[in-house]
Image (cartoon, rainbow, N blue to C red):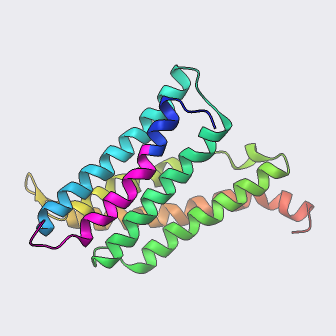
């Protein structure tokens, strides 16, 4: 495992998860819910920014690695799953939405791993619809975490609408990837 700046940023994202979750277990007398919401939003946004930044740095510094390519999406999925589970617990996201999004991530990760093993990883490379899904999630989740109006905008309502859009894009992208993999699945008798 090469330890370099991009991988250190990815590990930092993973290390932020228990802090992110732990905020909501602090007594309200120690940290009021509005402060917890703000802190969680800032942590999530920082993690999202470092996700972009570590990939950029890996390419710019020539520090790409197979381990980094593996760990980066794992860190993303862990942070999104933790955020969705928290949002369900807080009553801000329907459990079905969380199951759809997390279930898709597990399914497509498994599909990508299998496709890589049979030498066909290019068949399930990230597609535009997957990028749209990720963008919708990464904008909706901070809005739902913040859970208060900002500059006259009802972020809770906007986040709720956007998380439903993300769920629809999640299903669409899963269908896209499964259709791309179907010929190989049939060929291998799966």
* Residue 6 picture location, percent across and down: 50, 33
* Residue 37 picture location, percent across and down: 20, 62
Q: Nearer the viewer, residue 78 or 52?
A: 78
Report whether residue 126 is seen. no
Against 72, is 164 above or below? Answer: below
Query: Which segment is the magenta one?
Result: 12-31
Quarter containing the N terminus: top right
Q: Main secondary structure of the magenta part?
A: helix
Residue positioned 48% across, 26% down in the render: 57
Q: Nearer the viewer, residue 1 or 13?
A: 1
Report whether residue 26 is seen. yes
Q: Is residue 170 left or right of residue 162?
A: right
Against 5, is 136 above or below? Answer: below
Residue positioned 81% across, 47% down in the render: 120
Quarter containing the C terminus: bottom right
Whether residue 30 appears in magenta in the rendering, the answer is yes
Whether residue 155 appears in magenta in the rendering, the answer is no
Residue positioned 34% across, 71% down in the render: 86
* Residue 92 picture location, percent across and down: 28, 74
Q: Nearer the viewer, residue 32 or 95?
A: 32
């Amino acid at each position: 495992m090469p330890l370099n700046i991009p991988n250190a940023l990815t590990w930092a994202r993973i290390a932020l998860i228990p802090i992110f979750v732990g905020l909501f277990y602090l007594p309200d007398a120690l940290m009021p819910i509005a402060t917890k919401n703000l802190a969680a939003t800032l942590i999530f946004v920082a993690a999202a920014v470092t996700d972009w930044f570590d990939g950029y740095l890996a390419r710019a510094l020539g520090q790409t690695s197979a381990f980094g390519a593996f760990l980066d999406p794992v860190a993303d999925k862990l942070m999104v799953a933790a955020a969705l589970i928290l949002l369900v617990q807080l009553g801000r996201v329907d459990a079905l939405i969380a199951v759809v999004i997390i279930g898709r991530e597990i399914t497509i990760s498994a599909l990508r791993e299998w496709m890589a093993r049979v030498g066909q990883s290019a068949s399930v490379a990230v597609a535009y619809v997957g990028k749209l899904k990720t963008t919708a999630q990464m904008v909706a989740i901070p809005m739902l975490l913040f859970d208060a109006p900002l500059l006259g905008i009802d972020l809770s309502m906007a986040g709720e609408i956007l998380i439903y859009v993300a769920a629809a894009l999640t299903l669409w992208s899963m269908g896209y990837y499964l259709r791309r993999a179907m010929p190989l699945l049939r060929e291998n008798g799966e």
